[in-house]
Image (cartoon, rainbow, N blue to C red):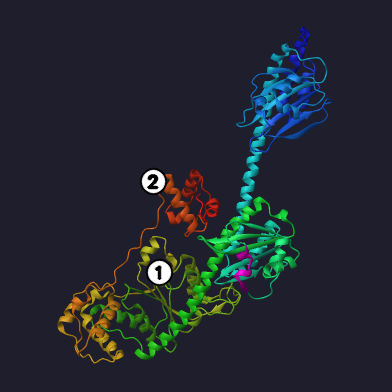
């Protein structure tokens, strides 16, 4: 084709229409506009736009037909040989069909049969990693003229800019979709994890977990198989179609689903034929099949490199277990493993706590029978001042705050206050806030109703309710969790309580005596103790002096303890030598009266005659020394990446994938959660990869 003078109007028409290019909404519209603009100067029958998308499995071919009414998008294998030679073309070029097919092998799959001449326009798009070429095709015998190439360069600029914009929009949409998917998965993981961690009873946890798994994944039935010695505990969620009936069921390990899949290092998909073989021995599988399920996904439950069992999920169709779904379920499995471990430990702690409570009640009654109550011994001004304060406050119902070091006799003074009060006919109730786990303290103080939480199979009265009409000693009150302090304050102000899980208000009449060896005022200033609760407790403070401030009482105390222990051990010891008294009075007694009582007890054990064997050299170095615990592992700052990877991997595995919180890997390593996440990202580490590699592979 020869360019003529009147063809300049065609160029002008293209330039005038150039403002229309940015208005096109998609590639088909762009190709139609291209044909319309080029017709006056560069007529053609077909146009092809080929785009290579680096993160997809196929390239795309947009093809506009001869009538410009239809534009198809066809995928093409992105691994075809010779394709990149097509993208390496730098300048517009004119080819016959035969030459084009010789130069580019990929053209055999691209160029239509009726093509005769091809004008190739490389499009240097501005999106990294993307490649694009435009192929203008004539089906007639008339070839493209080389004089049209300058016009093609002009045209290429408009098309390249618009295709770049489309690809940028597409890339942004892909990123938004990826972020949305990641956000949705994170929301699901957080929701399911919260449900799993909200219960300390395995069956209740499984029932609540199954509801969320059904909602998020549309999976019909959920079950657990947990190793328990030589047996396997089998549980089935009650919210599904399958059911194992009431109670727990245990089967032999050799007959279980989790044993059949050992070693449980990764998820397993079991189809119908395999399930039929297992159903004869495993009741969980049998119930899955009875509920018309045909496929089961078994997720391993691993806690600190120990396999606890499997989380089994059943459905009627294998299509439900996509790669993304199984990957997310595997992460959920880590949370379920931690929840199962917590439930197991809680059951053990609860059983021990009940036994200890019963033993404590028995020992308390035995001590009361043997000793007949405590006696405050001493004649020093310091102890006489304490007794004077006790006599002043005992007759009232005012709250008393006992302050003093460990071993100064705060519990004995509390007993004296109670016995001098009008409530002495009722037994004083005691609780040590530091000795009760935080998770149990609230229920121990305020009680709970049957069914208030998992494991609450009976009504339980708390210490406040038991102490109604009497005195309650709240020992080590400084160790009470902050979250529990507002409820204590409300009870002290309103004189009424509600049991956990209860709806009714119970009036109480309790005289409170609080004791602590901590500086509560300093804790208030450090925001570790509520100021309103402090002022409510500090109505009548009594400070108990340490033994070093009342040394004149040491001989009386020593004599009292000698007589009591000798009587209990059925020994006849009548005196303490003066050298022994002098040695006792010279000691610092960091353990105060309690330490003095222990020293005298040891002396009574060692004594063979009637005079107490109290040689100072015997007890040198025998006092309990404070053992410094080793520092928690810290995240290396200047060591090699290898050392940092090792430290992070160990912490994440020990914490079972938990990053944030007081029991998370960040706290274990002594860094903020954001700092740990940043370093993991730099090192190419993810929680999923670390937990998946716990069986021996390195991350």
User: What percent of the width, then of the height, locates residue 532?
Assistant: 44, 66
Q: Is residue 207 visible?
A: yes
User: Closest to the observer: 492 or 443?
Assistant: 443
* Callout 1: SS: helix
Position of residue 307 in the picture relative to residue 410 (left or right): right
Location of the N terminus (image quadrant):
top right
Residue 455 appears in which quarter of the rendering?
Answer: bottom right
Q: Which residue in the structure is indicated by mark 2? A: 639
379 sits left or right of 421 in the view: left
For image coordinates 32% across by 66% down, the residue present is 627
Quadrant of the rendered image containing residue 403? bottom left
Residue 448: image tag? none
Percent x, y of residue 437: 46, 71
Q: Nearer the viewer, residue 598 or 77?
A: 77
Q: Marks 2 and 1, Cα distance to the nearest angstrom?
A: 41 Å
Q: Which residues are magenta?
A: 249-260
Question: Are there few (<14), some (14-19), or many (20+) residues within 10 Å of tag 1?
Answer: many
Query: Mark 1 — residue?
Result: 478
| Magenta residue check for 257 | yes
Whether label 2 touches label 1, CB < 8 Å = no
- Indicate whether residue 544 is drawn in magenta: no
Q: Position of residue 412 (x, y in %)?
A: 34, 81
Image position of 278 (left or right of 356): right
Residue 585 seen in render = no
Question: Residue 457 at x, y = what percent?
Answer: 59, 78
Comparing labels 2 and 1, the label whose residue is closer to the camera:
2
Residue lying farthest to the top in this orientation = 5
* Secondary structure of residue under mark 2: loop
């Amino acid at each position: 084709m020869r360019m003529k003078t009147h063809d300049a109007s065609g160029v002008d028409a293209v330039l005038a229409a150039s403002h229309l290019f940015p208005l096109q909404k998609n590639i088909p519209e762009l190709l139609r506009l291209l044909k319309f603009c080029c017709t006056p100067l560069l007529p053609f029958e077909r146009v092809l736009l080929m785009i290579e998308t680096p993160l997809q499995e196929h390239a795309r071919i947009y093809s506009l037909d001869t009538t410009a009414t239809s534009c198809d998008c066809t995928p093409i294998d992105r691994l075809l040989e010779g394709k990149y030679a097509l993208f390496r073309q730098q300048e517009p070029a004119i080819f016959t069909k035969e030459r084009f097919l010789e130069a580019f092998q990929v053209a055999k799959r691209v160029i239509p049969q009726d093509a005769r001449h091809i004008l190739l326009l490389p499009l240097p798009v501005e999106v990294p990693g993307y490649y694009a070429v435009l192929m203008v095709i004539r089906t007639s015998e008339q070839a493209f003229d080389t004089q049209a190439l300058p016009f093609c360069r002009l045209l290429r600029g408009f098309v390249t800019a618009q295709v770049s914009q489309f690809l940028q929009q597409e890339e942004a949409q892909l990123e938004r979709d990826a972020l949305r998917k990641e956000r949705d998965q994170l929301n699901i993981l957080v929701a399911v994890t919260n449900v799993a961690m909200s219960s300390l009873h395995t069956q209740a946890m499984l029932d609540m977990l199954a509801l969320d798994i059904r909602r998020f994944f549309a999976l019909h039935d959920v079950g657990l198989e947990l190793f328990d010695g030589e047996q396997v505990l089998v549980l089935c969620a009650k919210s599904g179609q399958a059911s194992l009936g009431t109670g727990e069921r245990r089967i032999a390990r050799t007959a279980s689903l989790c044993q059949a899949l050992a070693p449980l290092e990764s998820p397993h998909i079991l189809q119908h034929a395999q399930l039929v073989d297992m159903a004869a021995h495993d009741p969980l599988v049998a119930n899955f099949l009875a509920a018309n399920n045909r496929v089961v996904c078994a997720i391993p439950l691993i806690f600190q490199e120990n396999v606890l069992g499997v989380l089994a999920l059943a459905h009627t169709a294998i299509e439900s277990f996509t790669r993304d779904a199984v990957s997310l379920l595997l992460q959920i499995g880590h949370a379920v493993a931690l929840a199962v471990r917590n439930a197991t430990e809680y059951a053990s702690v609860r059983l021990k706590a009940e036994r200890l409570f019963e033993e404590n009640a028995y020992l308390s009654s035995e001590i009361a029978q043997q000793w007949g109550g405590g006696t405050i011994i001493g004649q020093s001004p310091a102890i006489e001042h304490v007794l004077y304060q006790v006599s002043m406050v005992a007759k009232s119902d005012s709250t008393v705050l006992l302050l003093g070091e460990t071993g100064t006799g705060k519990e004995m003074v509390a007993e004296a206050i109670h016995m001098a009060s009008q409530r002495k006919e009722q037994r004083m109730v005691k609780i040590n806030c530091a000795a009760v786990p935080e998770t149990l303290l609230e229920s121990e103080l305020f009680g709970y109703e049957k069914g208030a939480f998992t494991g609450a199979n009976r009504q339980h009265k708390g210490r406040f309710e038991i102490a109604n009409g009497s005195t309650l000693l709240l020992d080590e009150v400084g160790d009470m969790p902050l979250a529990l302090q507002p409820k204590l304050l409300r009870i002290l102000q309103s004189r009424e309580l509600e049991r956990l899980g209860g709806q009714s208000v119970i009036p109480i009449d309790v005289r409170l005596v609080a004791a602590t060896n901590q500086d509560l005022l300093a804790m208030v200033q450090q925001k570790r103790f509520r100021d309103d609760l402090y002022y409510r407790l500090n109505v009548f403070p009594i400070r108990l002096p340490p033994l070093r401030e009342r040394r004149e009482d040491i001989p009386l105390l020593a004599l009292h303890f000698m007589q009591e222990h000798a009587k209990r051990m059925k020994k006849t010891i009548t005196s303490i030598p003066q050298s022994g008294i002098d040695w006792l009075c010279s000691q610092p007694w960091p353990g105060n009266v309690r330490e003095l009582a222990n020293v005298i007890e040891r002396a009574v054990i060692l004594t063979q005659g009637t005079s107490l064997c109290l040689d100072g050299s015997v007890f040198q170095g025998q006092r309990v020394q404070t053992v410094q615990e080793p520092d928690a592992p810290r995240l290396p700052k200047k060591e090699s990446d290898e050392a940092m990877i090792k430290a992070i991997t160990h912490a994440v595995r020990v914490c079972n994938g938990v990053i944030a919180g007081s029991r998370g890997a960040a706290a274990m390593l002594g860094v903020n959660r954001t700092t740990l996440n940043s370093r993991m990202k730099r090192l190419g580490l993810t929680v999923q990869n670390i937990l998946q590699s716990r069986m021996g592979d390195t991350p």
